[in-house]
Image: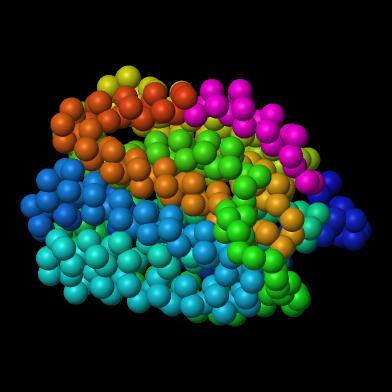
Amino acid sequence: MIIRLLYFCGIMEKLWNNNYVKVMVANFTMSFAFYLLTPLLPIYLAENFAAPKDTIGLVLSGYSITALIIRPFSGYMVDSFNRKKVLLSCLFFYFILFGGYLAATSLAVFAVIRTIHGGPFGAATVANSTVAIDVLPSSRRNEGIGFYGLSNNVATAIAPTVGIMIYEGTHNFNILFVLALAIAAVGLVVDSRVKIPEKEIVRNKSKLSLDRFFLLKGVILAINMLGFGFCYGVLSNYLAIYGKETLGITGGTGVYFMLLSIGLILSRMQGAKALREGKLTRNAAEGIILSTIGYTIFVAGGSMWTYYGSAILIGLGNGHMWPAFQNMMVNLAHNNQRGTANSTLMTSWDLGVGLGILAGGFVAEHFGYASAFWTVSAIHVASAVMYFVLTRGNFERNKLR
């Protein structure tokens, strides 16, 4: 009520403007197309190509590795050229490569297409999130960045469930690939109608340096985020197989992702006030503690209750942690480095996810899925310690805003 009164009196700027909503819708479609396939691709590779566990990890990690490689360059492109043109180019290639899955007739071809697909995905997410910052009023930026992630969270909640339902009803992966292609096309159309504020592109005439592609002031934050990304990479890609083979839970993957996303959505909404007030480090700390508990009881509990309970805790934790870390990274950067700041955070997350997929498949192949998830718990604890001992203080000393 108070916020509405401030808005109508002209004291507080409008958060939910038309362009911001369009950017969120486009982000939703990108995430939906991605998460529609994510939990089912290990099953697809095992069933259609008889791929062993470590090979599955290798094939799927290629997507994240390519996104990792392209993101620093996409941050530079977004900061140096017309953002809308860069965004639409990335979205077009992201959309069209879903059709490549339909044409893949061998494991090698699928691996190549999946690996290439990570490039436009990585670039499009950097460009879209940077455009979201551009269309937000400066007074609502922290809060808006937090809400922006809701579009991803809602997609995460719905898409795996929809994908699993379609698979269980048809056992036809081509239907899933066509659906992902169509949804990505919707995102391309929506983003083409976004109007970005005209800003002069400042050409940096200095020699190329690492800081043009990676925010050096954010290296501690990035390393910390890498650890958290590693954990989520293992969870998101091996959850279905672990639940089926180790816990005997079949058909529960969709419910798990739904609960995880409910936690994400609730924490984003609950944490909006703290973000608006600039309490970034507190939000991050709360999220890290919750998700650490979630990852630990996931593997330690061994029951239906701890399995699904961990989903809510991890969701609540990541929902607090992600927007806090993104705002912290942006607050370390100058205005003409927003793309670089976003790409730095996402690059570290992608590297962590890619390493998690690769290492998770290797550990599962040789020691079992339980060992893979115990490794996840240990790494999350170590990352939590790093945040409280090093990252939090480093941010407070170097923030610009």
User: How many numbered tags mark residues here?
Assistant: 0
Q: How is the image coloured?
A: rainbow
Q: Is residue 317 above or below residue 86?
A: above
**Pick the front one: 326 or 306:** 326
Question: Which region shows up in magenta?
Answer: 383-401
Q: Position of residue 235 (x, y in %)?
A: 34, 38
In the image, what residue occupies the spot 63% across and 41% down? 324
Q: Is residue 85 above or below residue 245?
A: below
**Pick the front one: 347 or 47:** 347
Residue sitting at the far front: 207
| 154 relative to 295 in the view: left or right | right
**Pick the front one: 90 or 72:** 72
Q: Position of residue 39 (x, y in %)?
A: 29, 49
In the image, what residue occupies the spot 90% across and 60% down? 10
In the image, what residue occupies the spot 70% across and 47% down? 332
Residue sitting at the far left: 50
In the figure, residue 104 lies in which quadrant?
bottom left
| 167 relative to 216 in the view: left or right | left
Would residue 14 be counted in the magenta stretch?
no
Q: Is residue 111 above or below residue 269?
A: below
**Does any portion of residue 248 appear in the rendered image?**
no
In the figure, residue 222 lies in which quadrant?
top right
Q: Main secondary structure of the magenta part?
A: helix
In the image, what residue occupies the spot 15% across and 31% down? 366
In the figure, residue 294 lies in which quadrant?
top left
**Does any portion of residue 348 appear in the rendered image?**
yes
Q: Position of residue 275 (x, y in %)?
A: 71, 42
Q: Position of residue 162 (x, y in %)?
A: 32, 56
**Pick the front one: 77 or 86:** 77
| 370 relative to 155 in the view: left or right | left
Would residue 395 be counted in the magenta stretch?
yes
